[in-house]
Image (spheres, helix red, strand yellow):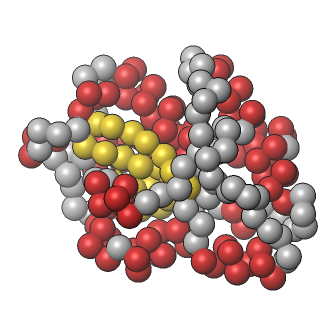
């Protein structure tokens, strides 16, 4: 695993967390990771920029299409999921009401020093689309080295109909469980992410 050293560049390094809609997992990871950096060493916040975005792999599009599950329009440029906002508020982040989700762009991939995806399908497709970025793209499970992290397909209770998106982004019990597991996974991944950037504990 090739490491990126903070000493090799004057510009801040850039980490991007990627999930599907950029309203729950990746958003929560962005803010929580920033908080964890600040608690470890306040100077890290100036050295490492953290952001998040959404990316829909074709395999997921095909899977949902077979189930006749459509995507909200617009899918991006939407407010944060309320359960995510509430969870972040408990962590000390009062996110602006003007915050909107965004889609991962080719420019973002090019500028990133590390991209961490929620799903393996996202990693696979991103590498096929951006082969030069292969060394910078990992899944959250790879970074955490923990098989307890849940993927999209691990949830068997999700309704595969027109209520799908309302459920996975708006059901308080479901979203709270996702956020809780995301937090536990990120805590496990934190030291490995720092090592990837050449930062020692």
Q: Residue at x 81, y 43 (%)?
A: 170
Query: For the view shown, which residue lies furthest in the front direction?
Result: 74
Above or below, comparing residue 56 to residue 50 in the picture: below
Q: Quadrant of residue 173?
A: top right
Percent across and percent down for residue 111 are 28, 54
The percent coordinates of residue 125 (x first, y second) are: 48, 76
Residue 82 is drawn in which quadrant?
top right
Residue at figure coordinates x 60%, y 66% from the top left:
56
In this rendering, the count of numbered labels is: 0
Nearest the viewer among 150 and 91 is: 91
Residue 98, given in percent of the width and then of the height, sits at 60, 30
Q: Is residue 50 visible?
A: yes
In the rendered image, which quarter contains the C terminus?
top left
Q: Is residue 44 left or right of residue 102?
A: left
Q: Nearer the viewer, residue 135 or 75?
A: 75
Q: Residue 2, how many percent across, how many down? A: 22, 61
Q: Is residue 32 left or right of residue 83?
A: left
In front: 88, or 36?
88
The answer to whether residue 34 is above or below residue 11 is above
The one nearer the camera, 75 or 169, is 75
Quick check: can you spot residue 143?
Answer: no
Q: Is residue 16 above or below residue 133?
A: above
- Residue at coordinates 60% horizontally, 77% vertically from top-left? 58
In the figure, is residue 31 to the left or right of 96? left
Residue found at x 42% / y 30%: 34
Whether residue 34 sits left or right of residue 94 in the image: it is: left
Q: Quadrant of the N terminus?
A: bottom left
């Amino acid at each position: 695993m090739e490491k990126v050293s903070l000493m090799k560049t004057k510009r801040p390094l850039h980490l991007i967390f990627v999930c599907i809609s950029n309203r729950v997992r990746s958003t929560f990871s962005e803010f929580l990771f920033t908080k964890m950096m600040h608690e470890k060493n306040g100077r890290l916040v100036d050295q490492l920029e953290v952001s998040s975005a959404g990316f829909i792999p074709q395999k997921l599009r095909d899977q949902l299409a077979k189930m006749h599950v459509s995507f909200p329009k617009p899918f991006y440029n939407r407010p944060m999921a309320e359960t995510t906002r509430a969870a972040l508020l408990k962590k000390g982040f009062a996110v602006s009401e003007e915050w909107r989700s965004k889609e991962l762009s080719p420019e973002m991939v090019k500028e990133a020093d590390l991209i961490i995806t929620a799903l393996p399908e996202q990693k696979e497709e991103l590498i096929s689309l951006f082969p030069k970025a292969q060394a910078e793209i990992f899944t959250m499970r790879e970074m955490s080295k923990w098989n307890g992290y849940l993927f999209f397909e691990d949830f068997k209770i999700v309704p595969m109909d027109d209520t799908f998106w309302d459920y996975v982004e708006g059901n308080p019990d479901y979203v709270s469980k996702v956020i809780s597991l995301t937090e536990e996974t990120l805590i496990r991944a934190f030291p490995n992410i720092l090592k990837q950037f050449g930062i020692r504990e």
